[in-house]
């Protein structure tokens, strides 16, 4: 392994740590499946469907935890791996619940927890309403199990008590902040699209749990001082905003074969993203009419989505939204270069370049 006091050393620590994170997640799910034999097959299958959800992701959150830990002086994988696994399990819980809110049953190109339950009931004698109730129950309960697991992975870790408590507090912060963002997001349909505070939603719903909290967890375990924590907070907020803005763009303009998600779901759900806020703000009257007819229309088809994309491009909304994403990345890059120690800053700058140019 490379010395940890280098960018390559931090990268090597992350690359070698991710398989251990995967094993920790697999072991957790396997153990949970066997803990209540009286609960039967359905309980075990629910756990199995949760385990399937963290396959094929970008591993952003555990990578940030591992990198912050190693880049700030940590060198014991067994201390950080359970916490990094908790960050990925927390992400899994958020995805399961977010899919419920969006009515999605596919994630990363595969059936999610809800979709898995619907597939299991194919050909059953249940009425359609009963099938829907089963599907919703599976997703709600599965998301709850994943949330509990994010705490469980940390509470069972072999860490000093003060580190366990601090990391558990970070999980609580992530959950509360994300729920606040989800509420703003879901309730935003009472507002005109151009009046929605889409950047605040992105910061609360995504940036905190996806970037800020994973980095702070690694920093906590490495013994970072309050000044460094403050720098990571600011960097994480900007990087998380950029990540979400690009994600929103991929939700409309991405290739489903690469993203694993439909380019219709966000439009059908009427998501008040910055991209669409700018579209309503900058389009001419005919363009706004196209957007008004399409956004929030549960029956929107590919042809209608193509017209939306044309409006977003011709109005300059897409160009401006991506410029906002680049600006937030620029802020994060400046903080990394000026305030973060070189091994970690180099890793983070490389990650920013990768995330800014991603297609999935």
Image (cartoon, rainbow, N blue to C red):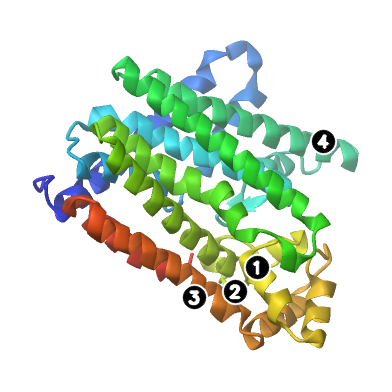
Location of mark 2 (residue):
253
- Residue at coordinates 56% horizontally, 68% vertically from top-left? 250
Asked if the residues shown at circle 2 and circle 3 are in contact, with their CB atoms under 8 angstroms apart, the answer is no
Q: Are marks 4 and 1 in contact (CB under 8 Å)?
A: no
Relative image position of residue 2 (x, y in whole percent): 10, 48
Q: CA distance from mark 4 to mark 1?
A: 26 Å
Q: Is residue 10 above or below residue 302?
A: above
Number of numbered discs visible in the structure rendering: 4
Mark closest to the chain's N terminus, 4 or 2: 4
SS type, badge 1: loop
Which of pointers 1 and 2 lies earlier in the amino acid sequence? 2
- Name the mark on residue 199: none
Residue position marked by numbered label 4 in the rendering? 133
- Tell me where residue 237 appears, x and y as whole percent: 45, 52
Q: Residue under circle 3?
A: 323
Measure how far apart labels 1 and 3 are at the Cα level: 21 Å
Q: Nearer the viewer, mark 4 or mark 1?
A: 1
Which mark sits nearer the N-terminus, 1 or 3? 1
Cα separation, mark 4 vs mark 2, equals 32 Å
- Counting residues from the start of the chain, the first of labels 4 and 1 encountered is 4
Q: Are marks 4 and 2 in contact (CB under 8 Å)?
A: no
Q: Quadrant of residue 198?
A: bottom right
From the image, state whether disc 4 or disc 2 is nearer to you.
Answer: 2
Characterize the local packing of mark 2: few (<14), some (14-19) or many (20 or more) Cα atoms within 10 angstroms. some
Residue 112 image point, x, y percent: 62, 46
Q: Residues within 10 Å of mark 1 (few under 14, many from 20)?
A: many
Q: Could you say where residue 100 lies in the image, as x and y percent from the top left?
A: 71, 44
């Amino acid at each position: 392994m490379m010395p940890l006091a280098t960018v390559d050393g931090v990268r090597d620590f992350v690359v070698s740590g991710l398989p251990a994170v995967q094993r920790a997640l697999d072991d957790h799910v396997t153990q949970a499946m066997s803990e209540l034999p009286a609960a039967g097959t359905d309980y075990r299958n629910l756990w199995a469907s949760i385990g399937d959800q963290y396959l094929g992701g970008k591993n952003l959150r555990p990578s940030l935890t591992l990198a912050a830990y190693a880049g700030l002086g940590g060198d014991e994988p067994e201390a950080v791996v359970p916490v990094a696994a908790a960050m990925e399990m927390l992400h899994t819980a958020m995805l399961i619940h977010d899919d419920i809110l969006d009515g999605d049953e596919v994630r990363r190109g595969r059936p999610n927890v809800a979709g898995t339950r619907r597939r299991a009931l194919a050909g059953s004698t249940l009425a359609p309403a009963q099938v829907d109730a089963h599907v919703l129950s599976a997703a709600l309960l599965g998301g709850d199990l994943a949330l509990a697991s994010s705490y469980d992975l940390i509470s069972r870790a072999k860490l000093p008590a003060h580190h366990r408590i601090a990391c558990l507090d970070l999980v609580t912060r992530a959950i509360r902040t994300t729920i606040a963002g989800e509420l703003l997001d879901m309730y935003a349909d009472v507002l005109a699209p151009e009046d929605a505070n889409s950047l605040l939603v992105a910061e609360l719903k995504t940036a905190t749990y996806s970037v800020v909290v994973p980095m702070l967890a690694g920093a906590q375990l490495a013994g970072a001082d309050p000044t460094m924590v403050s720098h990571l907070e600011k960097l994480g907020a900007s990087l998380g905003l950029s990540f979400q803005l690009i994600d929103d763009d991929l939700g409309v303009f991405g290739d489903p074969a690469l993203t694993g998600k439909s380019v219709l779901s966000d439009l059908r759900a009427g998501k008040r993203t910055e991209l669409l806020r700018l579209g309503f703000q900058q389009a001419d009257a005919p363009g706004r009419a196209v957007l008004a007819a399409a956004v929030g229309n549960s029956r929107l088809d590919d042809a209608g989505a193509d017209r939306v994309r044309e409006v977003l491009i011709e109005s300059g909304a897409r160009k401006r939204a991506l410029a906002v994403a680049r600006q937030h990345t620029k802020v994060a890059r400046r903080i990394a270069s000026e305030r973060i120690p070189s091994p970690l800053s180099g890793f983070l700058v490389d990650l920013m370049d990768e995330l800014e140019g991603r297609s999935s």
